[in-house]
Amino acid sequence: MTTRIHVVHPREMTSADLGLWRELQSAPPGAATTNPFMSAPFTQAVGRVRPDTQVAIVHQDGEPVGYFPFQRGRWGHGGAVGLGVSDCQGAVVRPEARLDPQHLMRACSLSAWEFNHLESGQELFLPYTTGRFASPVIDLTSGFGQYEAHLRARSRGFLKAARAQERRMDRRLGPVRFVYEERDPTVLDTLIAWKSAHYRRTGRRDPFTRPWITELVRQLSAMAHPECSGVLSVLYAGERPVAAHFGLRSRTVFSCWFPSYDRALAAYSPGRVLYLRMIEASAASGIRLFDFGRGDAAYKNAFKTADLSVHEGVVRTPGPGAALHWLRREPVRAAHRLVRSQPALKGAAVRTLAAVGSLRRH
């Protein structure tokens, strides 16, 4: 079998490339590749805000068999498309294709390729993983009614409290109204402001301080493509937005991304009410998998029906570039792994971040 790989910018992909990418995403049904973060439109959107975005087009025996999107920086240090904000990463290739990851890296002029949300179906890169994490999901294949019955049986108190909080908001703040796909850009601005304040308050790095991320979100909010559409969902009480979420969806997968709420109304748990409405509307619109994304959170555990596994790691090719990448990244990654594996250290880290956030506010 002869393998040939050539690298292009996403804007240089042909209509035939885009058609094959779409075809590969739709088969087999339910694969990780149906995630909107794995779509060609998402890679193209990142390419418009990040000039270092590339796509390796793989041919075997003269026929195209797949696509590997990536970003490439100095010294050949690369990462997944949208690394830092993308929640599903890897290559989109035919199941029968046989690729050598080292050959792929060399063809892409990469000395290292880093990922942090690789799903388990990405057999090409699984040997290079250094950590595995749970990504809570909701299976909606049987519809919202079946899911609600599951939630009532598993978390009856949680569901009952959410319904009660919605009625309480309705009485005290004004009629509660939910918009699944809000098109008012001022509400997106409100959500970004809420989310940025949350990052600062908790001592975490605010991704919206990086202009390319803010611009990417704005571009995606206007995108309505079957494989990748931006969805801004908003919960109102009266005319006041009380909670909002911006995420991405494909035909069958909804990927949560940026949720937040009006902190002054935290006593009403508006985020919980918003998620319940979003899940119902998603099921009605054809979503079969509602993906909360990697990360620990009590609300995710209460809503979920199962967990997917996602992985972090790095593929390196022998040479000085890879050695430099190891020196720059591995000590930090090892420290993070140690903290995550020790509950006492993890608790101390959370408290330290909260203290940093408090100092920022003052």
Image (cartoon, rainbow, N blue to C red):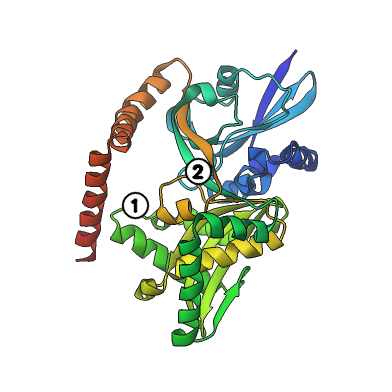
In the rendered image, the quadrant that contains the N terminus is top right
Q: Residue at x 51, y 26 (%)?
A: 110
Three-letter residue code for mark 1: Arg
Question: As rendered, which of 219 and 311 lies closer to the eye?
Answer: 311
Q: In this orientation, does residue 64 appear?
A: yes
Across and down, in percent, residue 133 comes to 45, 37
**Left-right relation of 67 to 257:** right
Question: As rendered, which of 273 and 59 lies closer to the eye?
Answer: 273
Three-letter residue code for mark 2: Ser
Crowding at dot 2, Cα within 10 Å, few <14 / some 14-19 / many 20+, comes out as many
Quickly name the residue at label 1: 205
Q: Residue at x 48, y 48 (%)?
A: 85
Q: Which corner quadrant of the image does residue 320 belong to?
A: top left
* SS at badge 2: strand
Q: Is residue 174 above or below residue 307?
A: below
Across and down, in percent, residue 118 comes to 53, 35
Q: Residue furthest front?
A: 153
Q: Estimate the spatial distance between the alpha carbons at disc 1 and disc 2, rounded to whole Å.
A: 21 Å
Across and down, in percent, residue 180 comes to 62, 68
Question: As rendered, which of 111 and 262 lies closer to the eye?
Answer: 262
Quickly name the residue at label 2: 135
**Left-right relation of 133 to 57:** left
Across and down, in percent, residue 33 comes to 66, 39
* SS at badge 1: loop
Q: Is residue 132 above or below residue 11?
A: above
